[in-house]
Image: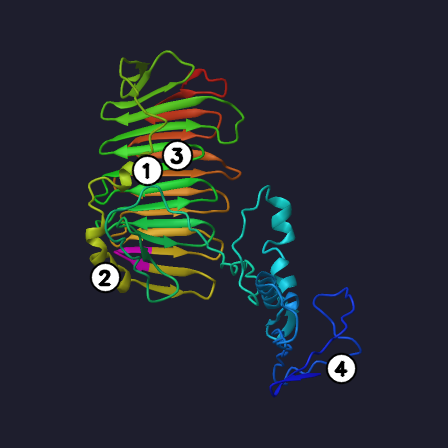
């Protein structure tokens, strides 16, 4: 200890041993547990200001000014900084020497740009992963979109009953894949999905059509076009007939001539049979002479609201919709009657039978043990049993046998 002019300068020497950890260690320090609730401790370093020399001391012992500044910079670099929420004391010199890039970034980056000097005591800013975004569900949209608001379906007040489709059709779905379509004008169409049978009657009753596995029947006015073929595929013959004002014309796909059966008998004729097998005659009859669309939804909704139904004890159900009485028995047989009882439709999903009756036509078909197709208009008749095709008019009969040869009876 030295004293000069009342000023006392003290010098403290602390022996520091080399350490292997992060930051310096003080010698002979007693280990203790870290108390996070304690106040942070800031180490006060001893003053390293040079002692003023006495007047008798030689001038050569005065420290160099440049060495003094370097020593102060080193002391400033060797300061203690506290980082993290636990206020961990670290050496600023060691901390500033740590790279700001992670090992993964150093390994994957070929050339890392020089990072700016980080202030002492500032922790490294790590790149945080963005929080996981919720999965986005995309819905497919149709390519063609209808302009304007889509009309809502008018559902009935009771669980069973007719519904109004957006195209202006009243639809009634029954059991065993039987669907009944009606229009406001009075046309009706029945589709038996299990047996692939379709029947339609126009609103005025002058047109009717049936599409059956045994053939196609198309009646429009006084003319009836018939096409018959074997649904059991025991032969590949297709027979055609036409009932018109002169009689019945008939032919076959393997026959080059067309025959006419009239009051004079059976003879050849130059008449043509032009029945298109690719045409949907049931749909033509159903939409014949009617107006359907979204402009009639209000009136169709009133029809559905005024409809009624009854449940029978034998598991049958009966509907009254737009002047039609529609009933289905327990075995699936569907019967449809118009209020005047002049139009009748029957079909069964079990044996594939179908019946169509109007003031101008009566026809039946079946796929059961007696598979057949029968058509009658006034005194003209046609019967087909899968093998033989026979027509009768004015007391004369003719047709094709099982070998597709013409027979006159």
Asked whether 321 falls inside the magenta stretch, the response is yes
Find residue 357 and report its image quarter. Answer: top left
Q: Residue, x 78% and y 75% (percent of image)?
A: 27
Q: Are marks 2 and 3 in contact (CB under 8 Å)?
A: no
Secondary structure found at label 1:
helix
Quadrant for the C terminus in the image:
top left
Foreground mark, 1 or 2, reads 2
Foreground mark, 2 or 3, reads 2
Query: Counting other residues with Cα less than 10 Å from the Cα at mark 4, is it few (<14), some (14-19), or many (20 or more)?
Result: few
Find residue 29 and report its image quarter. Answer: bottom right
Q: Are marks 3 and 1 in contact (CB under 8 Å)?
A: no
Per the model, the C-alpha gap separating discs 2 and 3 is 39 Å
Per the model, the C-alpha gap separating discs 2 and 4 is 90 Å
Name the residue tied to disc 1.
Answer: 282
In front here: 326 or 381? 326
Q: Earlier in the sequence, mark 2 or mark 3?
A: 2
Name the residue tied to disc 2.
Answer: 302
Per the model, the C-alpha gap separating discs 1 and 4 is 98 Å
Q: Earlier in the sequence, mark 1 or mark 2?
A: 1
Name the residue tied to disc 4.
Answer: 32
Image x and y of residue 353, in percent:
45, 42
Q: Residue, x 22% and y 34% (percent of image)?
A: 221
Q: Are marks 1 and 2 in contact (CB under 8 Å)?
A: no
Which residues, given as a range, are shown in magenta? Answer: 320-325
Horizontal side of 162 relative to 130 (left or right) equals left
Q: What is the image's colouring? A: rainbow
């Amino acid at each position: 200890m030295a004293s000069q002019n009342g000023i006392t300068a003290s010098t403290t020497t602390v022996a520091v041993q080399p350490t292997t950890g992060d930051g310096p260690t003080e010698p002979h320090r007693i280990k203790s547990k870290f108390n996070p609730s304690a106040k942070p401790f800031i180490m006060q370093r001893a003053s390293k200001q040079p002692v003023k020399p006495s007047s008798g001391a030689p001038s050569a012992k005065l420290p160099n000014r440049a060495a003094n500044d370097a020593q102060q910079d080193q002391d400033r670099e060797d300061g203690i900084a506290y980082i993290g929420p636990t206020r961990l004391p670290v050496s600023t010199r060691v901390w500033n020497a740590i790279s700001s890039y992670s090992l993964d970034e150093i390994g994957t980056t070929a050339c890392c740009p020089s990072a700016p000097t980080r202030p002492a005591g500032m922790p490294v800013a790590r790149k945080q992963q963005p929080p996981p975004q919720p999965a986005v569900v995309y819905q497919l949209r149709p390519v063609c979109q209808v302009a304007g608001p889509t009309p809502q379906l008018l559902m009935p007040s009771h669980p069973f009953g007719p519904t109004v489709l957006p195209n202006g059709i009243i639809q009634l779905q029954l059991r065993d894949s039987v669907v009944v379509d009606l229009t406001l004008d009075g046309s009706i169409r029945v589709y038996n999905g299990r047996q692939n049978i379709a029947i339609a009657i126009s609103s005025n009753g002058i047109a009717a059509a049936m599409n059956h596995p045994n053939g196609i029947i198309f009646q429009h006015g006084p003319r009836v076009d018939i096409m018959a073929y074997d649904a059991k595929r025991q032969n590949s013959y297709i027979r055609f007939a036409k009932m018109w004002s002169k009689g019945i014309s008939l032919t076959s796909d393997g026959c080059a001539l067309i025959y006419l059966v009239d009051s004079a008998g059976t003879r050849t004729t130059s008449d043509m049979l032009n029945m298109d097998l690719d045409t949907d005659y049931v749909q033509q009859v159903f939409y014949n002479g009617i107006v359907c669309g979204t402009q009639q939804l209000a009136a169709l909704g009133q029809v559905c609201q005024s409809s009624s139904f009854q449940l029978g004890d034998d598991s049958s159900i009966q509907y009254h919709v737009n002047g039609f009485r529609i009933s289905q028995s327990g075995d699936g047989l569907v019967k449809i009657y118009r209020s005047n009882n002049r139009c009748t439709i029957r079909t069964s999903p079990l044996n594939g039978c179908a019946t169509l009756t109007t003031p101008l036509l009566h026809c039946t078909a079946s796929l059961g043990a007696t598979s057949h197709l029968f058509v009658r208009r006034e005194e003209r008749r046609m019967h087909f049993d899968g093998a033989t095709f026979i027509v009768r008019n004015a007391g004369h009969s003719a047709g094709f046998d099982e070998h597709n040869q013409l027979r006159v009876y």
